[in-house]
Image (cartoon, rainbow, N blue to C red):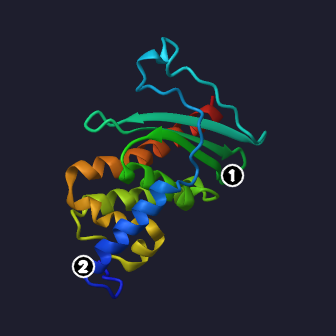
């Protein structure tokens, strides 16, 4: 892992600043999902219809819940019908700790406009970063691809935080799989 010319204290400070900023001013957050945490959410909870805002896109949606801490997120993607399939639009709704919210926000910035293959490569890199237990990635080019998401290296030291950071990425992977499956049906 590159130290980016910083000591560990400087890196930790950057980690905290980026995560706090991304969680306070999240990108891609919209209110569209049922609030499953509410008792009065009703029997129709989970039955929602979100239409693609582009007629040349196929939508996919996934709801993720972390029972350990209560974080939850619904990720909605719209994938172009043309090859190579591109993520034309990605939004999310949910609540949770600053790590899960910041990870979702930074994920939106990283994947929107990218091909599905490129987004899945980023998802794999982020998983490897989370599995590093604070060591980071061995390849500086891979770290560069993650852009601001590299600050979650600090979260990878703590197993309970890893689940929070991965919540949105799991939702993205599942939503993309649903969108691609819908294209083939």
- Whether residue 59 is situated above or below residue 28 in the rendered picture: above
- Whether residue 166 is situated above or below residue 20 in the rendered picture: above
Out of 144 and 23, give the one closest to the viewer.
23
Mark toward the start of the polypeptide (2 vs 1): 2
Out of 75 and 120, give the one closest to the viewer.
75
User: Which residue is farthest right?
Assistant: 55
Q: Is residue 9 left or right of residue 50?
A: left
Question: Would you call the spot at circle 2 few (<14 residues within 10 Å), some (14-19), or many (20 or more)?
Answer: few
Tell me if I can see residue 139 in this picture: yes
Q: Is residue 100 left or right of residue 155?
A: right
SS class of the residue under badge 2?
helix
User: Which residue is farthest front?
Assistant: 24
Q: Is residue 50 left or right of residue 6?
A: right
User: Which residue is farthest top?
Assistant: 43
Q: Residue at x 39, y 49 (%)?
A: 100
| Quadrant of residue 114 within the rendered picture | bottom right
Q: Is residue 175 left or right of residue 130?
A: right
Residue 41 is marked as none
Question: Would you call the spot at circle 1 few (<14 residues within 10 Å), some (14-19), or many (20 or more)?
Answer: few
Q: Residue at x 70, y 37 (%)?
A: 52
Out of 101 and 61, give the one closest to the viewer.
101
Q: Residue at x 61, y 32 (%)?
A: 182
| Quadrant of residue 133 within the rendered picture | bottom left
User: Which residue is farthest bottom?
Assistant: 5
User: x%, y% of residue 72?
Assistant: 41, 37
Residue occupied by mark 1:
83
- Whether residue 179 is situated above or below residue 108 in the rendered picture: above
Residue occupied by mark 2:
8
| Quadrant of residue 123 within the rendered picture | bottom left
């Amino acid at each position: 892992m590159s130290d980016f010319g910083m000591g560990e204290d400087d890196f930790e400070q950057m980690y905290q600043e980026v995560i706090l900023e991304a969680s306070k001013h999240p990108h891609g957050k919209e209110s569209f999902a049922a609030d499953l945490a509410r008792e009065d959410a009703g029997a129709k909870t989970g039955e929602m219809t979100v239409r693609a805002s582009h007629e040349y896109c196929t939508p996919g949606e996934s709801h993720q819940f972390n029972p350990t801490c209560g974080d939850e997120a619904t990720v909605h993607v719209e994938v172009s019908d043309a090859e190579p399939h591109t993520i034309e639009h990605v939004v999310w709704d949910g609540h949770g700790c600053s790590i899960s919210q910041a990870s979702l926000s930074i994920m939106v910035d990283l994947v929107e406009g990218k091909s599905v293959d490129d987004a899945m490569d980023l998802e794999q890199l982020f998983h490897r970063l989370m599995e590093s237990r604070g060591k980071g990635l061995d390849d500086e080019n891979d770290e560069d691809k993650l852009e601001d998401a590299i600050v979650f290296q600090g979260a990878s030291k703590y197993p309970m935080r890893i689940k929070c950071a991965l919540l949105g990425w799991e939702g993205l992977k599942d939503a993309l799989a649903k969108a691609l499956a819908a294209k083939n049906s």
